[in-house]
Amino acid sequence: MLDSRKIHLLDKYLQHREVHSVADIGSGDCRYIKYITTKEYGRELKKAIVIEKDTTNLEKCRSNLPSLDLILVNSDIENLSNIDALKGEKADIVLLFDILEHLTCPKKAVELAKSLNPELIFISTIGEPLDNIRDAIERDPEHVLMFNQTLLFRFLRRLELKPIEISQDHEILFAVARP
């Protein structure tokens, strides 16, 4: 199921653009790339770069996006194996949805996103108020790292990204940034 908050963010920032290529890091089944193909701004979408560690999800991407030139990379973001397949590749936008909170070093994912020279990077991650972060991580051991709006802003700036928007809706943080 698509998250309407992510859809709103994509539509808001892409409605006056043409997207020819997209990269999705930690993509799951590529549902947001598929969504982009249904929109006016995605009518020229020709290429998708997908980095995903689950081979079943990569196969779902292949079946969900049959008309696109796909570069499928089976890799764990933390270890970045098979990354040579991306040398020289570029993407107009990069999606980092629901991945940063699972990484001990989210810097690697953002640096990978930046290496694709996108115009925009879209991020969603679990966010908690600063005083609740430890409790939230203990509640869900798959989440090894959490941000609040201030920490996410500082993290993006430290990696030389320019945040355009950072917002929070309940427990989810959303960000759009430019390299």
Image (spheres, helix red, strand yellow):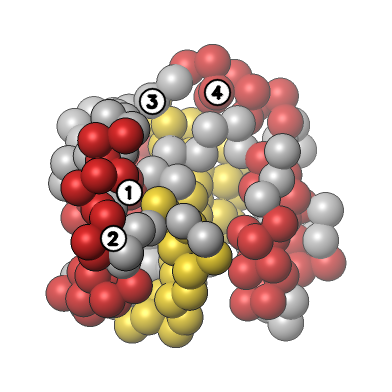
Q: Is residue 63 visible?
A: yes
Q: Nearer the viewer, mark 2 or mark 3?
A: 2
Q: Which residue is mark 2?
A: 147
Q: Which mark is on residue 140?
A: none
Q: Nearer the viewer, mark 4 or mark 1?
A: 1
Instruction: State the quadrant of the C terminus.
Output: bottom left
Q: Which mark is on residue 57?
A: 4
Residues under numbered marks 4 and 2 in contact, where contact means CB atoms less than 8 Å apart:
no
Q: Earlier in the sequence, mark 2 or mark 1?
A: 1
Res 149 → quadrant? bottom left
Q: Residues within 10 Å of mark 4 (few under 14, many from 20)?
A: some
Three-letter code, disc 1 = Leu
Residues under numbered marks 2 and 1 in contact, where contact means CB atoms less than 8 Å apart:
yes
Residue sitting at x 32%, y 34%? 139
Q: Which residue is mark 3?
A: 53
Task: Give SS at disc 3.
Answer: loop
Residues under numbered marks 2 and 3 in contact, where contact means CB atoms less than 8 Å apart:
no
Three-letter code, disc 4 = Asn
Residue sitting at x 66%, y 50%? 3
Q: Earlier in the sequence, mark 4 or mark 1?
A: 4
